[in-house]
Amino acid sequence: FTIHNQTVSESCPSNIALIKYWGKYDNQIPANPSISFTLNHCKTNTDMEFIADELFSVKTFLAGNEEEKFGDKIEKYFRNIEQYLPWILQGKYIIRTENTFPHSSGIASSASGFGAIAKCLMSLDESFSGKLSEEESLRKASFLARLGSGSACRSLYNGLVVWGESQVRGSSDLFAVPYPKDEIHEIFRNFNDWVLLIHEGQKSVSSTVGHGLMNTNPYADRRFQEARENFGPMKEILAAGDMEKFIRLVEHEALTLHAMMMMSDPAFILMKTGTLDVINKVWDFRKETGLSLFFTLDAGANVHLLFPNDGSEETVKSFIGAELLQHTQNNGVVKDVMRF
Ligand code: PMV
């Protein structure tokens, strides 16, 4: 076995789910399928230095600062995936990572972070397994990223991405697959995601704990069924370019995710008052202007404002300035776009 000393560098974007993954079984098997947009600007850049023939250890630096807790998490993750990368424990790692978006902005840095780490691992694996085809390599990276953070497996592909057995051709619980581009109306191929940073502090409940609480949530099975069923209309909406139905479905998914949290035992709430203020103002704005501006939420307080990139930027910008910015911390808005 030979993997020589080397440093590999990879970059991976974050993603935002439209049909949400919330609840899982052992080995990161999702309780329901999910679909997301991969972002274009919000990325993690990672350098991974591998020093062969040293005792296995992992040191991680985030934006130059050592992060021991993250290092411990990665060490555990590497031990967990040894069965898929037999060489992985045979050296020492120095991992330097930085995000192109603000820390703890609630933009999923675990998705971009594990995506980038999985890509680095596949790049190291080339010296061991030989070069795989790009398709095989991405699929295995997606498989490995899933074992780090479920939603990370969707970040390996651009555009709309599906994870979990569903009505989408080729979909799997083990890795994500790109949603067939020729079945996506062009209106969905140039879309804005502007994230309003409502609350930048630590989340009160981690997503690991949140997923766990679905195990005893009496509404969980109904929810998993609903998410599976939502793939039917979603497929039709994407093909037809039906914006009205898209908005209804995406907002419903976001609110259902948070409703599940409120119906957990113990219950928890990740929205803040600013989240609710923004949602109400978005609804009013849509009623008044007829513009396709809507929202989705991740497991946190921040609001992702979604709208097609069709010339309404200036109107949305003034609306944010006049009505929404007051609900953010430090006037925080992170602008991204999905273009594919
Ligand atoms: O990937 P995890 O385990 O952090 O789960 C995150 C799940 C959500 O972001 C809330 C929804 C999703 O599908 O991305």
Image: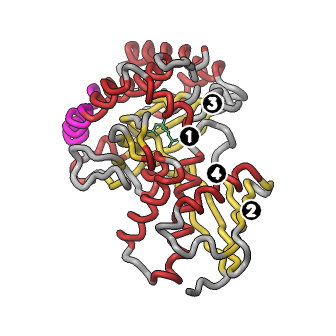
* The one of 42 and 317 positioned closer to us in this rendering: 42
Q: Work out whether mark 2 precedes mark 4 in sequence or the reverse, and give the earlier one.
A: 2
Label 3 amino acid?
A: Leu
Q: What kind of residue is marked 1?
A: Lys
Is the C-beta of the residue carrying label 2 under 8 Å from the nearest atom of ligand 1?
A: no
**The one of 249 and 206 positioned closer to us in this rendering:** 206
Work out which quarter of the rendered image holds the N terminus and state it.
bottom right
Q: Residue at x 72, y 29 (%)?
A: 330
The kind of secondary structure the magenta stretch mainly shows is helix
- Give the label, 2 or 1, closer to the camera: 2
Residue wearing tag 2: 59
- Residue drawn where x is 41% and y is 55% of the image: 158
Give the SS element for disc 2.
strand
Residue ID at (26%, 46%): 184
Rounded to the nearest angstrom, the CA distance separating label 1 from label 3 is: 11 Å
Rounded to the nearest whole Å, what is the CA distance between mark 3 and mark 2?
30 Å
Mark 4 highlights which residue? Answer: 100
